[in-house]
């Protein structure tokens, strides 16, 4: 990425003033110092990933020695990161990519990006209450971020707070990307509420395997229990046995489960192939 060369003449405007908008990375270097040339190359590569989040500036000490003493630079290479008009970080000597990215991430990540790791851990642990709290805090900071509301609605359904999930969904525009995921999950939960429990449905299917309605009900309850593969197998069996049952509900329910699983989900990809193969075999020659 292109970088501004900084001297005492433009330090105020291109570094101090600019740092009010985003962090400014100022690298002190010189062609005559190989280590600083190496760090310069690394910084330029890394900073390409932070375009729009941080700015790179350079001070060639061989050309202008007036600025370095002002920022207490005693050797090369040396990095000063200025944010909000003050030095936020300084790195003296050789620096590796991981170290540089850690510093930059700490200064440039939005609250949403910073909370994503915490959210993933909470979800993996099944702590939906904790996940909901994290999302609600992030929405307070970024009230217009609809993707956060989508995630909150999805978490609330999984937490069992269906009324709150409905309220959040009602606040999300219909055309918002991903909105159908919590909407489908909510509809599964609402449908399951009027059905027998998992054990009873399982026993009913085992006692009467030809009862497609019982198999469908079991699939719905399995979705709510997050037993997605078991639900997909049941729906695929319904499709194979009777495509016309409840207007092709086996196939349509599989599609809804794919949506609940989300984009890029491996299980969804696996069963999309199975669905395609089943449909292909059922097509007239």
Image (cartoon, grey):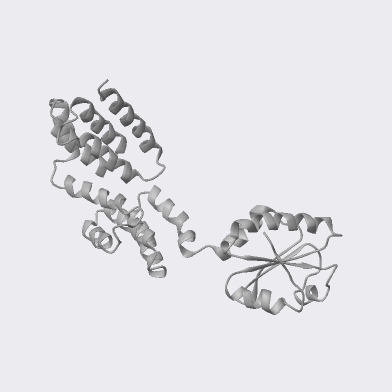
> Residue placed at 14% from the left, 34% from the top?
214
The residue at the point 41 percent across, 65 percent down is 138
Determine whether, in the image, residue 128 is placed left or right of residue 218. right
With respect to residue 74, does 99 lie above or below?
above
Residue in front for this viewpoint, 184 or 104: 184
Is residue 47 visible in this depiction of the protein? yes
Q: Nearer the viewer, residue 45 or 215?
A: 45
Q: Is residue 225 visible?
A: no
- How far from the left and from the top, in percent, is residue 166? 23, 59
Residue 150 or residue 240, whichever sits in front: 240
The answer to whether 132 appears left or right of 97 in the picture is left
Which quadrant, please, contains the C terminus?
Answer: top left
Is 203 placed left or right of 229 in the picture? left
Which quadrant of the structure image shows residue 91?
bottom right
Q: Residue furthest front?
A: 285
Q: Does residue 189 appear to the left or right of 178 in the view shown?
A: left
Question: In the rendering, at what x and y percent does residue 70 appear?
Answer: 77, 77
Which image quadrant for residue 41?
Answer: bottom right
Location of residue 21 with respect to 183 vertically, above or below: below
- The single residue placed furthest to the top in the displayed view is 285
Where residue 155 appears, as percent x and y from the top left, is 32, 54
Q: Please, is residue 157 above or below residue 228 in the view?
A: below
**What residue do we see at 24% from left, 51% from top?**
186
User: In the rendered view of the protein, which quadrant contains the N terminus?
Assistant: bottom right
Q: Whole-percent x and y of residue 202? A: 18, 32
- Number of marks drawn: 0
């Amino acid at each position: 990425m292109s970088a501004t060369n900084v001297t005492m003449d433009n330090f105020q405007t291109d570094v101090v003033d600019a740092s009010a908008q985003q962090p400014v990375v100022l690298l002190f270097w010189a062609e005559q110092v190989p280590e600083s040339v190496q760090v310069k190359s690394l910084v330029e590569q890394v900073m390409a990933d932070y375009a729009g989040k941080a700015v790179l500036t350079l001070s060639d000490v061989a050309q202008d020695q007036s600025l370095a003493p002002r920022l207490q630079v005693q050797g090369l290479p040396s990095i000063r990161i200025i944010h909000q008009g003050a030095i936020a970080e300084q790195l003296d000597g050789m620096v590796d990519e991981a170290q540089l990215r850690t510093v930059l991430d700490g200064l440039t990540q939005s609250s949403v990006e910073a909370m994503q790791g915490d959210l993933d851990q909470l979800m993996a642990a099944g702590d939906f209450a904790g996940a909901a709290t994290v999302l609600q805090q992030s929405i307070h900071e970024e009230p217009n971020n609809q993707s956060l509301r989508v995630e909150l609605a999805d978490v609330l359904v999984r937490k069992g707070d269906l009324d709150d999930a409905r309220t959040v969904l009602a606040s999300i525009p219909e055309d918002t990307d991903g909105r159908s995921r919590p909407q489908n999950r909510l509809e599964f939960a609402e449908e399951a509420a009027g059905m027998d429990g998992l054990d009873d449905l399982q026993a009913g299917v085992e006692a009467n395997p030809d009862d497609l309605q019982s198999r469908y009900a079991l699939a719905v309850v399995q979705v709510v229990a997050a037993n997605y593969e078991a639900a997909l197998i049941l729906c695929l069996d319904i499709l194979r046995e009777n495509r016309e049952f409840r207007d092709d509900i086996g196939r349509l329910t599989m599609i809804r489960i794919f949506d609940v699983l989300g984009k890029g989900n491996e299980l969804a990809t696996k069963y999309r192939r199975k669905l395609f193969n089943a449909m292909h075999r059922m097509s007239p020659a």
